[in-house]
Image: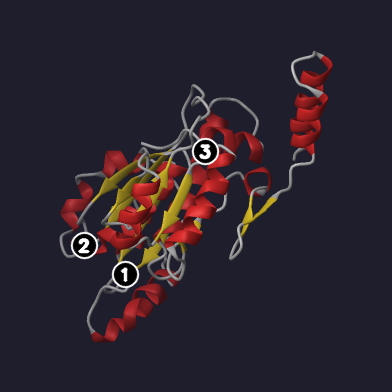
Amino acid sequence: MRPEQVEQLARQLLAGELSLEAFTQQVARPGIADVGQAQVDLDRPNRCGFPEVVYAPGKSVEVMEKIFQALLERQTEVLATRVSPEQAAQLLTRFPQGRYNEIGRVLRIPPPQPTPKPPGPQGRVVVVTAGTTDLPVAEEARETALWTGAEAILIQDVGVAGPHRLLAHLDTLRSADCIVVVAGMEGALPGVVGGHVPCPVIAVPTSVGYGASFGGVAALLSMLNSCAANVVVVNIDAGFKGGYVAGLIAQKLAHARAGSSAPSPSSLSEQKTSAHS
């Protein structure tokens, strides 16, 4: 628990708004929830701004239920990635308030009592795909950016084989705080986008392509060698990582524009709990 949170509880205790027992329980509350097969990091919002994210492959539905419940008890919006349709069907029976993006294989569950969303901008992320086949990775990035509290706009199928398609979206691209570009094949699109915008471009190579694409390695190497200085690269098919970092950048810039100091990790976490859509 962060010092300012302890101070707030102490003020409530002194004002008679909180009992001594409730104060003690909250201050002594552990930062880890042991659910058997997983140790859920409940303190991560205080350190990093956003809660722990659940990677679904290899986890049983029963284990995920326990993890989700531990997070929801802390009024945390759940984000789970790479959730299969079969897993999602069972989990939505247990958590009917959840929403599953079948294309991106992302499951989000709002907390029972979400924190009201604060006024003011939360930042803008634009997610761009080179081709339609890149959409699953792009949807993972978009859902993750939304989960961070940012506005997330999707631009589809504007790869370099038809460069005029990208130019039609320049106004939207230039309005972004951060852009996530998802591309397979030769992976040229992030550098092209980077040459048109004054913001960070996060390149996400995908495993889309024929033999010599080597499952996304060709796109990865191309992006790593981009001449555009504002392009950085994450792992192959890592839509989550691209969306997460983009959302973090967007929120920081939004707060800077609003004239406030950079938000603390705990305040970012409070904003994020109401960021589902």
Between 136 and 222, the one nearer to me in the picture = 136
Q: Which kind of residue does numbered mark 2 sit on? A: Gly
Residue 163 sits in quarter: bottom left
Residue 211 sits in quarter: bottom left
Q: Which kind of residue does numbered mark 1 sit on? A: Gly
Where's residue 7, x and y in %?
80, 27
Q: Is mark 1 on a helix, strand or loop?
A: loop
Left or right for 267, reference 156: right
Q: For the view shown, which residue lies furthest in the bottom direction?
A: 211
**Which badge, 2 or 3, comes first in the chain's sequence?**
2
Where's residue 23, x and y in %?
78, 29
**Which badge, 1 or 3, comes first in the chain's sequence?**
1
Which marked residue is nearer to the observer: mark 2 or mark 1?
2
Q: What element carries label 2?
A: loop
Q: In this picture, is 195 found above or below 247?
A: below
Q: Is mark 3 on a helix, strand or loop?
A: helix
Question: Which residue was labeled with disc 1?
Answer: 187
Give the CA distance from mark 2 to mark 3: 28 Å
Q: Which kind of residue does numbered mark 3 sit on? A: Gln
Between 195 and 137, the one nearer to me in the picture = 137
Which of the image's four quarters has the N terminus?
top right
The residue that appears at 79% across and 41% down in the rendered structure is 28
Query: Which label sits on residue 251?
Result: 3
Between 60 and 118, the one nearer to me in the picture = 60
The residue that appears at 54% across and 33% down in the rendered structure is 271
**Which badge, 2 or 1, comes first in the chain's sequence?**
2
Question: Which residue was labeled with disc 2?
Answer: 131
Which of the image's four quarters has the C terminus?
top left
Give the CA distance from mark 1 to mark 3: 27 Å
The residue that appears at 33% across and 50% down in the rendered structure is 127
